[in-house]
Structure formats: C-alpha cells, structure tokens
Image: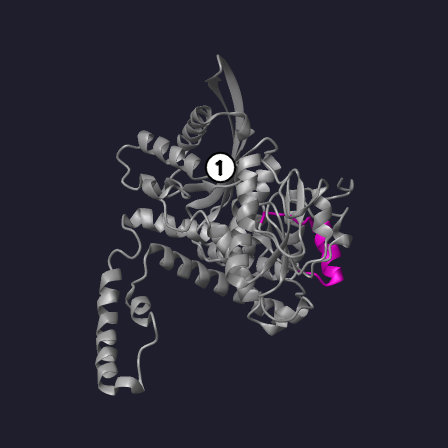
Amino acid sequence: MNQRNEPSFRESVDLMFNRAVALMDLAPGLEEKIRVCNATYTVRFGVRLRGQIQTFTGYRSVHSEHMEPVKGGIRYAPSVHQDEVEALAALMTYKCALVEAPFGGSKGGLRIDPRQYDEHELEQITRRFAYELAKRDLIHPSQNVPAPDMGTGEREMAWIADQYARMNTTDINARACVTGKPLNAGGIAGRVEATGRGVQYALREFFRDERDIEKAGMSGSLDGKQVIVQGLGNVGYHAAKFLAEEDGCVITGIIERDGALFNPAGLDVEAVHNWIRKHGGVTGFPDAAHSAEGAAVLEEECDILIPAALEGVINLSNADRIKAPLIIEAANGPITAGADDILRAKGTVIIPDMYANAGGVTVSYFEWVKNLSHIRFGRMQRRQEEARHQLVVDELERLDRYLGDAWSMSPDFKKKYLRGADELELVRSGLDDTMRIAYQSMRTVWHEREDVHDLRTAAYLVSIDKVAASYRAKGL
C-alpha cells in the first residue's frame, strides 16, 4: 500500500511543474496560467442496456489552448475521476510542446469497466459518449481531437469518428476529428505500435551519448541489456517486442495484474503476449517462474525498468528498493513525486513520461495531417523516388559490366535501393526524427545547466518555455 503522505497523481504533476518553474523567469501570472486547467466538462448520460437505463459518467478536460486543436486520449476505466483526467491533460500540454506537435493538451475518460460489456453494448455507450462530447465541440477536427488510451483502441475510435460524421454530414474533414482509427477508416500505418516504438527510439537515443550512459552507471549499448516490463498491454508489448527482436535486449521480467513472470535467461515476448490473450493473465505460463506478488518483481535486478501500465506503481513504499539504474516511463505518471525524489537521490536515471510515451501523439499528429490533406503519405513521391534511384542503379550496372570481376554491387543492394518509402517507413522515419530532436533538447538542458540534475526537470523546462512563448505570441 502507498504511504498516507503519498501525493496524488495530480499533485505529483503540479509538484514536478513547480520544481521546474522555480528555475525559470516567467512573467508574473504566466506561471499560473500555464499550470491551471482551462476547463473540465463532466457529462452524465443514460443508455438503455439489458432492459434498463444505465447512467455513465464521463469527462473531457482541456488544459491549455495555447495551440488548437487540443489533443489527448480517452480512457475507459472504473477508476477514472476528474483529478486524474486533469493531470493527464496537463501532461499532454507539456508532451505536445516537447515533441513540437502543434496541439494544446486535453484528456478524456469514461468511468466504466469495458470488460463488463459486450461489443454491441460498448458501441452504444461509446456512440452516446461521443454524441455528448461532439455537440459541445469537445470532439472536433479543429478544436479537440481525441485518441485511444487505456481501455480503448482502434474500434472505439472508428465508432467515435462515424458518430461525429453522422452529426456533421457536410464536414469534409470529419475523419480528422479523432486519431488512432483503423487503416480502413482513415487511420495511418504504424499508429497501433507508435507509443511502444517511441519507447524504443527514446532508449536508442539515450544510448547514443556516453555522458548519459555514464550518469546511469552503465556501459555499452542496448544489446544484452536486461529489461523488466510492467504491463504487457499495447505499449509494453510493442516496446518489449522491438527491444528484444531489433536491439538484442533480454526481457527478464513481465508483470501483469495477476502476478509476474521472471526468467534471467529471457522471456519470449510473443509467446507471453499470446498466452495473456488466451488466458487473461500470465498465470500458468510455462518456461518461467511465476510470482503471485507481481509488484515485487519491480524490485528485481535489471538494467532497464519499463513501467507501462498505471500511474503510481513506483511510490514511497517501494522506491528505495528499486534496483534498476535506468527507468523509462512508458506509462503516464508511474513514478510519484515522492518516489522521484528518492530515486534521484540514489542516482537512478529516469526518462520521463512526457517524453518517453510521446510516440503515440506524434503519430497521431501524422494521422491528423493525413486526414486533413486527404492523401496517404508516399502516394505522390514514392514511384518518382524509385525512378531517380533507377538512374543510379543503371549507372552502377554499366560500371559493373565495364569493370567485370574487379567490382560488383553488394547482394540485395539493387532491391533495397530501388524501393521507395511507403507510409509505414515514412511514419517511422518521422517518429524517429521527432524522438531524437526532443531528447536532444532535454539532453542539452540536462548537461549544460548546473541547476538541472535530471531529465524530468529538463523536459519540463523545455516544454514550459515553448508554451510560454506561444502565450507571449498571443499577447498574454
């Protein structure tokens, strides 16, 4: 259990914000303008289910409109409440500013356990929730653009997009009212994996700088690093899968709601993922030790710890026992403000949530642009790219014939070089570039300012400075 003096999620966000602005010189009143939530809407609506009317409570919080539209996911969970939604909306503001996505911050939530309803019932509930938000312009391509979050996915986003289109039959940009849609409903290649892919790109950028690696008391590259992942949902699964398959990491622990698996030799992420889908949890999975007390595995020896589920899992009650020298926050707010103080004092390096899980909103931005431009990425330039590459290959083949055995093209060079980039490759390229530039902006502050000792403070300083600049440009 958390200790009684543990700050709430919203208090943690405010404490971390305050720690950063204390190092800034903002105009009087601007600090409060940036910190406070502009508006939070509570909607209560009824849906006739199973022979009776059931009433549901939902929220949509708008934190900052320094840029519009505002952007942020909609989560379905029985624990959803106003403070949580407002804290998440604030994080979205700073996250969008950090990765230079042209959005303000927003967040939504519906107090519901989606596992208690079948697909048809969930569609009825989602459509009614979307109706309540859309008629207040809380879903709108140019004002407020939701996305998936915990408990929601492509399916729910498709229902929301269709509901908005039914209500706005002449809006040519209706598909841009929400992101995270399926490909056949206006989505974009790579969106489902985007947040997990962003975690991978963040770690790659971290390991490109010897100074960063040394601060964590580590050495070498990602290859062979032992990783524990808490939560094998969409984000945790993709992050673990990519790190294991493409970067040589060894996934030694996977923590889920019914306990944890641990194997120092490494776990097969795909096999565990399939087991969870079939059995609803990790219990009974072969080839690994199972611990009923999953939270204890957070404290096992590893190189990198990836909390990828709920907020507050690392708190005052367990922070001093966390052994990982490097933690990357794939979830929102997994480390409380109190735990953050303890970990920083120990020298633990934390790659903060507002940066680490920004892959989702980055690719959502690409999807929104795609929807507004009404054309998929790569459609105009791909074949022209291939034609230009063909000219180079033709010249190389002529040289090959002229030189004979003295020189030849590498195997598969022609096939690889001639292939123009498709939408998925362009999305990955854009995401990689975004994650690199955002990290570099934090790294510069972290290493060059003597009063900044951690990446979280650096991230807040970079993002708050950008939000403040936007407000100043508006004349505030």
Residue 332 magenta-highlighted: yes
Q: Quadrant of residue 26?
A: bottom right
Q: Which residue appears farthest toward the top when viewing the image? A: 51
Residue 213, horizontal then vertical, whole percent: 63, 69
- In the rendered image, the quadrant that contains the N terminus is top right
* Residue 372 vertical position relative to residue 117 in the rendered view, above or below: below
In front of the other: 419 or 134: 419
Q: Is residue 2 left or right of residue 220?
A: right
Residue 426, horizontal then vertical, whole percent: 36, 59
For the question of whether residue 71 can be seen, the reply is: yes
Q: Quadrant of residue 28?
A: bottom right
Residue 471 magenta-highlighted: no
* Residue 245 vertical position relative to residue 61 in the rendered view, above or below: below
Residue at 54%, 36% in the rendered image: 278
Query: Amino acid under label 1?
Result: Thr
Residue 142, horizontal then vertical, whole percent: 37, 43
Residue at 63%, 57% in the rendered image: 227
Residue extent of the magenta highlight: 331-349
Residue underneath mark 1:
152
At mark 1, the secondary structure is loop
In front of the other: 286 or 97: 286
